[in-house]
Image (cartoon, rainbow, N blue to C red):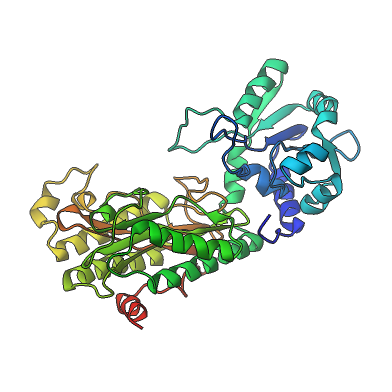
Amino acid sequence: MKYTPISPEMYQYNRQRFAAQMQPGTVAIFNSNDMMPRTGDQYHIFRQNAGLLYLSGIDQEETMLLLFPGCPREDHEEVLIIRRTNEHLAVWEGHKYTKEEAREASGIKKVYFADEAEAVINELILISEGIYLNLNENDRFLSPVEYRDLRYARSIRDRYPAHTIHRAQPILKRLQTVKSRWEVEATQEAIDITEKAFRRVLGFVKPGVWEYEVEAEITHEFLRNRATGHGYTPIIGSGKNACVLHYIENRNQCLDGDVLLMDFGAEYANYNADLTRSIPVSGRFTKRQKDVYNAVLRVMNEAKKMLVPGTSFVEYHKEVGRIMESELLGLGLISKDDISKQDKDWPAYKKYFMHGTSHHLGLDVHDIMFRYHTFEAGNLFTVEPGIYIPEENLGIRLENDVLITVDGNDDLFKNIPVEADEIEELMNG
């Protein structure tokens, strides 16, 4: 792996916290992600299941983790199962964890190879009172693609129909949304790499460059700084393309007078940064562009003030909407009449700011979350307002990553330029 492994202390800490919330006498079972086919004989680059990685630190396919606090069988409260390697695999796929390496990475003493673990799994399930299974419970995403944990859940129900099944995700959500110091350090490393890439493109962008060339500059800086790669497919949209929220083609030329919206973030140790900046291709904003830019910046700064313990996620977004409404009035994009006639389910400001302001960030860019909970210390949020004006070929979004602390918050992007004047100065320095 390119990145420096996180201390096994973190994974031991995570397992202890998870086990403390399990029902007595139960076993929890976690599977790695599938290797996803790319073509007839190739796979996409492997990315580990967030829950398994969070609890074990094992970044390898065909891995299983079993947690059984108070297990009657000695030394089996934590069991790690890994793929057995051989000379053929070593030649074609490279090195895989040995048992000793897996112990060192995870802090788990009892490690089995997959081909010797079936009887152990069966015994632990049979002496348990119930089974925790880990399924994707993202409330805004329902994929038609089956995955390893889902198939495994079906096989468990078929083979052990008398056992009670429990959900692992509610526990993981409670734990993963509160970041430990190790997680903050890994995220900060991803952010620092992202900053280097942003400063690089500030010196690169000029009229005539292509969006894909900007993407290439970012990718170069990521890889040379030991990032795994992009945390998500980068959005590099100039002119009218900036008004497409998930524009990822990155194929057009950046023209004089355009604003270039760039939404990208490095992944380091499977933790992600998520940055958006909008810059003038020519190096100077027009007055109108700067007015819109500063309106977005004011919304972002006001939104950050609300990212504190005790704020309701739902009310936060409503309040940000009211702030944006005021800014759009000032820009002449909506009128008081528009507001008086608006649909409460689709306010007038949504015409120009149609997405949410914040999401959790962590092992996934859109990290698992409780949407209806209040904020608490340790939550790590993006804050990303935007104004999109297709009729002006102008889209501006700004995004920082903010850690909520006991007495307020910490903007982890505080060293990354965001003021319009500073952007212009760096582009023309």
Is residue 106 something that shows in the picture? Answer: yes
Q: Residue furthest bottom?
A: 429
Residue 173 position in % (x across, y down): 57, 45
Nearer to us in this view, 420 or 156 = 420
Nearer to us in this view, 340 or 200 = 200
Q: Is residue 9 above or below residue 84?
A: below
Q: How many marks?
A: 0
At x 71%, y 36%, the residue is 62
Residue 281 position in % (x across, y down): 28, 68
At x 66%, y 58%, the residue is 2
Q: Is residue 257 left or right of residue 417?
A: left
Nearer to us in this view, 364 or 259 = 259
Which quarter of the rendering shows the C terminus? bottom left
Q: Is residue 225 above or below residue 34?
A: below
Q: Quadrant of residue 210?
A: bottom left
Q: Residue furthest left?
A: 337
Q: Is residue 382 left or right of residue 291?
A: right
Q: Quadrant of residue 275?
A: bottom left
Residue 337 position in % (x across, y down): 8, 53
Nearer to us in this view, 410 or 216 = 216
Is residue 310 something that shows in the picture? Answer: no
Which quarter of the rendering shows the N terminus? bottom right
Residue 240 position in % (x across, y down): 23, 54
At x 82%, y 50%, the residue is 101
